[in-house]
Each structure stands twice: as structure tokens, then as C-alpha cells.
Image (cartoon, coloured by chain):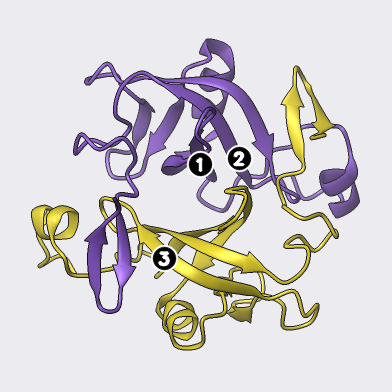
Chain colours: A yellow, B purple
Amino acid sequence: MSDVSSAERECGKAFLPKFDSQGLLIAIAVDSETKDILMVAYMDEEALAKTRETGLAHFHSRSRGRLWLKGETSGHFLRVQEMRVDCDQDALILLVKPEGPACHTGARSCFYRRLDGEDLEPIA
Amino acid sequence: MSDVSSAERECGKAFLPKFDSQGLLIAIAVDSETKDILMVAYMDEEALAKTRETGLAHFHSRSRGRLWLKGETSGHFLRVQEMRVDCDQDALILLVKPEGPACHTGARSCFYRRLDGEDLEPIA
């Protein structure tokens, strides 16, 4: 993909996702209603294709080394309403409608704690 | 860091950031007023320490292989108001007050395009 110029990638109309040396890009799932960030994960080419094809967020699990349909066991799917891409096209925002808590802990968002000095505190 | 249990990391009060095999974690900068995602980048241990120490967002530039104070050349610093961590502590949200456009293209946010079919369209 090194034949794509920065200008094309940053200013063009073409969607030219840039995967890193491990074949991954960052995908941030955001609640389309509240604008809260629900979770962040990686996508490879397969996960991106499946997400676009089905409208359900798919990621690449680095720990399991495989395609991961978010909600495949919990039923808590993320329905993708819109996708946004950053300047150099190596990160995506998925605006989603979550069908249940996005976090495996049962929290609505994986970001349920803030740093307060040296400690973590739950976000009200 | 493998001696830290999942339960400690997910439920505890201790901040135990989990860097990946490349020594990095994901940091998402969010405008603390509008909740818009401004940019996403990586932090290593040094960037995280510098961010906490100075209150200005620092990242690790993978392309340049070095510490990167956001705004070091442009003056467009990101002042960190709050940091949030996700369940497994391998991703951070920085709630920031941006001192100028966050994107090197001059856009307020790096996410200035959405996917419309096969094409990218500017976000109004």
C-alpha cells in the first residue's frame, strides 16, 4: 500500500484503509446517541469486510488470533450506523447502536473508571 | 506484568496500564466539552509518564520511533483534564482541552470524513 500518497490518503475521496505491520487498524466504537466511547479494538482486513457486509461490528482478537463478531457469545451486538476514518486512514470510528452492555464485565462502556491521582475511581 | 490477575486489572483500584508486545497502548483524545474524538495514537511508558507529569498529551510516534509531545511544532497542545482506562487497562481516553486544531491537516479532529458507500465524504 506504499504506492498510495499521503495526499491521496488524507484528502481523497477513496477509502484506502491503512493496516499496520501486523495487518491491523484501530476501531473505536462510539454510542451514536450519547457519543460515549464504548470500546476500542483492532480490525484486520477480514473484520473490516465483515463489518461492512453485515452492519455488525467485527474485530480481530489479538489474544485469540481470530475474527471476533462482537456479541457472538453474549448477544450484545454493536449495530454500525456510520463509519468515520482519520486523516491517514489507520483508525476508524464506528458509530453504533449497542444491543446491550458493550463490556464483557457487564458495564455499558469498557471505560468505567477514571484516574484519580494514583487510583482508579468508578465514573459516576 | 503477567503476574497481575484479570480481576485485579478489571475490578481493582490500582492503575496497572497494560502495554502490548511492542510496549504500547492506545490513547484516544476526546474534546472534554464536545465529546468529539479528536485523534488516536499510541503511548509507551515514557509518553504516559510525561503526560501525567506535565498535563500535556504525549504520545509515542511509531513512524519516528520517539516520544512526541503533541503540539511540539504546531503549538496545538492537548491539555489533559481527565484520564479514563478501559476494562483490561490497555487503552486510555484522554479528556482534553485542545489548543487549536488537533489534526496536522488543520482540521479540528482527525476524523473529518465518513464512509458513504465506497467513498469518503466530509463530515458537515
Indicate the amino acid at tag 1.
Ile
Camera-side residue of B45 and B108: B108
* Chain hosting mark 1: B
Let me know if residue A48 appears in the view: yes
Camera-side residue of B1 and B48: B48
Question: To which residue does mark 2 refer?
Answer: B92
Which mark is nearer the camera, 2 or 3? 3
Which mark is nearer the camera, 1 or 3? 3
Check contact, mark 1 vs mark 2: CB within 8 A: yes
Check contact, mark 1 vs mark 3: CB within 8 A: no
Mark 1, Cα crowd under 10 Å, few <14 / some 14-19 / many 20+, is many
Q: Where is residue A55? Give x, y as percent.
A: 51, 81
Q: Which mark is residue A83?
A: 3
Mark 2, Cα crowd under 10 Å, few <14 / some 14-19 / many 20+, is many
* Chain hosting mark 3: A
Question: Which residue is located at x 89 percent, y 45 percent?
Answer: B11
Q: Which mark is residue A104?
A: none
Indicate the amino acid at tag 2.
Leu
Indicate the amino acid at tag 3.
Met
Side of B71 where B22 appears, left or right? right
Q: Which mark is residue B28?
A: 1
Q: Where is residue B95? Give x, y as percent.
A: 56, 29
Going from the N terminus, do you reach mark 1 or mark 2 first?
Answer: 1
